[in-house]
Image (spheres, grey):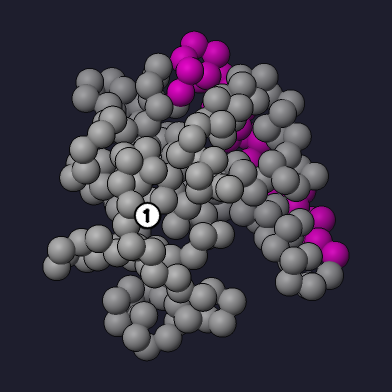
Amino acid sequence: MKLYGHPMSTCTRKVLTTLAEKGHEAQFVLIDLGTGQQKSPDYVAKHPFGVVPYLEDDGFSMYESRAIIRYLDAKLPGNKLIPSDLPSLGRMEQWLSVEQSYFTPHCMAIVMEMLMKQMRGGGKPDMDKVNKGRDQAAKALDVVDRALRSQAYLAGDTFSLADISWLPYLQYLSVTPQGTLITERPFVKSWWQRISTRPSWKKVNG
């Protein structure tokens, strides 16, 4: 099994965390995002959208991180990260969709302005973009905070792929000045503490 990606890529990190949770190692092939290797003809021949990650497994290949983590959980032995009971499965899928549609675009708008732009020497953040991102991300996290009043994880009482999918975005948000979006919501804060201290995430984030 080969995983093509970059260790700082949010989507690659989801896959690496899933592999760590399953106790499995894949051969890691570094794609240098700094030089634009993901847009090279050789890589685009594998992944037509020119982004990471990309998985090869015994003659089978696929892309899209949320699809890859479902595939890995179904294939690999170890603790199941997709719930077997239908209500929990439904909740997992719901929160994967909420992450993708209502949280991540706004969270990453903050991260791009307050973290990535400065790392790349791009100057001061555009605070209009930051504030707009904060307002929308706050709405999503308010919904999460209410849900977590009565359960430990997004799908219920068991850690799942839904929690994994939120991890990389929350991690980057937490190191910006807007990390208060996490800490000012008590149930989100305690959930973040639970998921960010798991050995799998420590391995990926170390």
Measuring from the top left, give residue 74's x and y in whole percent.
20, 41
Q: Residue furthest bottom?
A: 41
Indicate the amino acid at tag 1: Ser
Label 1: how many residues lie within 10 Å, few (<14), some (14-19) or many (20+)? many
Q: Residue furthest left?
A: 59
Measuring from the top left, give residue 61's x and y in whole percent.
22, 65
**Is residue 134 highlighted in magenta?**
yes
Position of residue 126 in the picture relative to residue 132 (left or right): right
Q: Quadrant of residue 177?
A: top right
Vertical order, 50 against 190 (above or below): below
Query: Across the whole image, how many numbered discs are drawn on residues?
Result: 1
Residue at the image position 31 percent from the left and 33 percent from the top: 81
**Is residue 158 highlighted in magenta?**
no
Position of residue 96 in the picture relative to residue 122 (left or right): left
Vertical order, 204 against 163 (above or below): below
Disc 1 is placed on an element classified as helix
Query: What secondary structure predominates along the stretch shown in magenta?
Result: helix
Q: Which residue is mark 1?
A: 65
Measuring from the top left, give residue 78's x and y in whole percent.
25, 34
Measuring from the top left, give residue 122's x and y in whole percent.
78, 72
Residue 63 visible here: no
Q: Residue furthest top?
A: 150
Residue at the image position 41 percent from the left and 75 percent from the top: 50
Residue 81 visible here: yes
- Magenta stretch, residue numbers: 124-153
Q: Quadrant of residue 87?
A: top left
Q: Residue furthest right?
A: 124
Residue at the image position 34 percent from the left and 86 percent from the top: 42
